[in-house]
Amino acid sequence: MPVVVAEDVRKSFGSLTVLDGVSLSVSEGELIAVIGRSGSGKSTFLRCLNGLETPDSGQIIVAGHALAPGEEALRALRQDVGMVFQSYNLFPHLTVGKNIELAPRLVKKIGKAEAADIARSVLAEVGLAEKYDAFPEQLSGGQQQRVAIARSLAMRPKVMLFDEVTSALDPELTGEVLKVMEGLSRSGMTMLLVTHEMAFARKAASRVVYFHQGRIHEQGPPEEFFGAPKTPELQQFLGAVL
Amino acid sequence: MIRSFGPAEFTFLVEAARWTVLLSLLAFIGGGVIGMVVALMRVSRNAMLRNIAAGWISVVQGTPVLIVLFLVFYGLPFLGLRFPPLVAAALGMTVYASAFLGDIWRGCIEAVPRQQWEAASSLALKPAQRMIYVVLPQAVRLAVPPTVGFMVQIVKNTSVASIIGFVELTRAGTLMNNVTFQPFWVFGSVALLYFAMCWPLSVMSQRLERRLHAGRRS
Ligand SMILES: Nc1ncnc2c1ncn2[C@@H]1O[C@H](COP(=O)(O)OP(=O)(O)O)[C@@H](O)[C@H]1O
Ligand SMILES: [Mg+2]
């Protein structure tokens, strides 16, 4: 039983077709690395999976929730789907601890003490236990991104989506974030991540997916995908980035 | 008989200035409450609410405060609503302040980056929770300087209430000038008293700004 199913998902912004029939099925525990040129629709696809964008047509089922219009249905889905953004998007007016506790308390109605326990445990998971009382602006980019991951984890999601989460970081800070994601994957989390880190995709992904002009142009296990790309478009893309 | 402008006359102005303070407070409280509603309507997802708020803002902003005041004081009695000058002035100033504060606060809410909404949505927060816990606290920080700046405008604009016979500071000044014929001293004092009311607001704005900012670092 796949955790993520997308079937013939289409999406246009005005006359611009961004997703031109995307189908993808992700099994539990998989780590899907999504790569492709800028503008090929990777972010839009990820954002469709948690309802930040609404597809024009097609079907999406994530963690057992069919994507349907309406706030209630969306919120049920989002409780099981974590999303981490390129720009961290921590809440600047709240401490690290409060950032993490907010959703468990408001959405899951968890008590103060229990929420604090959860916050401390997810912070420990990303190696930032001592930053509980810090404000986001006091942290480095890599630390902020790890807090953002912890904030998502605190909701105990069944799937996590990562959209170029290391792209805004200085090169020396990407490693710590990638390490956290690798650990998460090893612990069994189902993950989809849009990334430019080819070495990471090669090492950690169970499958690599190449987006080209709003479609999944080619996909496969990393050895095959990077070792013997079939389509000229992917060969050309890999030639340019590797 | 011509009085000269002395301490007793100055005291008269100070006492009138208390009415200016009261009217300003009423306008700020009334305008703040309705302005908050206007701002929230203006950013609502409901198109009708948005349009009503936008209409309110542009109509009121496009009307001189004085005319708003005339409408309330002279116009409403035709509909059977007759108010004493203080109430009429407070109502008129409330209408005026609600449009400006509503517009200022709309801007502050919209200035909070879209990504903050998206992060809150992704965490399954309800629309009202996103607004209350994520967006408004950040908007408030942005709102302090323009809001206090506008409070200074309110204080100064209460002078229009003098036209409908409400004896606040400006009206007291003209009355005093009529009996002393010392416009330099009278209106100089009036100006000084307005300054004494507005200056603390500016100082408060700076303090608040600093404290809100420091709060993030502590
Ligand atoms: N909200 C939007 N409105 C209009 N165009 C958009 C919007 N979001 C994305 N696009 C456009 O859709 C295309 C695909 O964007 P995106 O999914 O972000 O690509 P990628 O993540 O692969 O770089 C781009 O041309 C982008 O400009
Ligand atoms: Mg993108």
Image (cartoon, coloured by chain):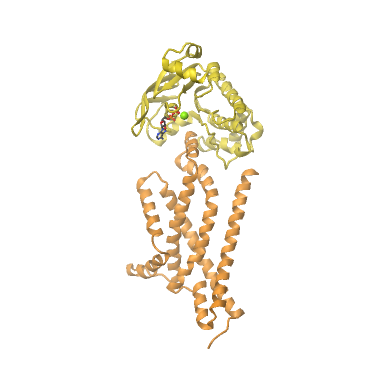
Q: Is residue B188 above or below residue B198?
A: below
Q: Colour of chain A?
A: yellow
Q: Residue at x 55, y 72 (%)?
A: B190
Q: Colour of chain B?
A: orange
Q: Is residue B51 above or below residue A52?
A: below
Q: Is residue A241 above or below residue B108?
A: above
Residue B31 position, x and y percent, is 46, 58
Q: Residue furthest bottom?
A: B1
Residue B151 position, x and y percent, is 52, 60
Residue B170 position, x and y percent, is 50, 72
The reply to whether residue A27 is visible in this rendering is: no
Q: Nearer the viewer, residue A125 or B218?
A: B218
Q: Residue furthest right?
A: A130
The part of the image, by quadrant, that contains residue A143 is top right
The reply to whether residue A24 is visible in this rendering is: yes
Q: Residue at x 48, y 65 (%)?
A: B157
Q: Nearer the viewer, residue B122 or B129?
A: B122
Tell me the quadrant of the picture where the C terminus of chain B can be found: top right
Residue A86 position, x and y percent, is 52, 31
Total marks placed: 0
* Left or right relative to A55: residue A162: right
Quadrant in which ligand 1 is drawn: top left
The part of the image, by quadrant, that contains residue A235 is top left
Q: Residue at x 62, y 34 (%)?
A: A140
Q: Nearer the viewer, residue A121 or B204?
A: B204
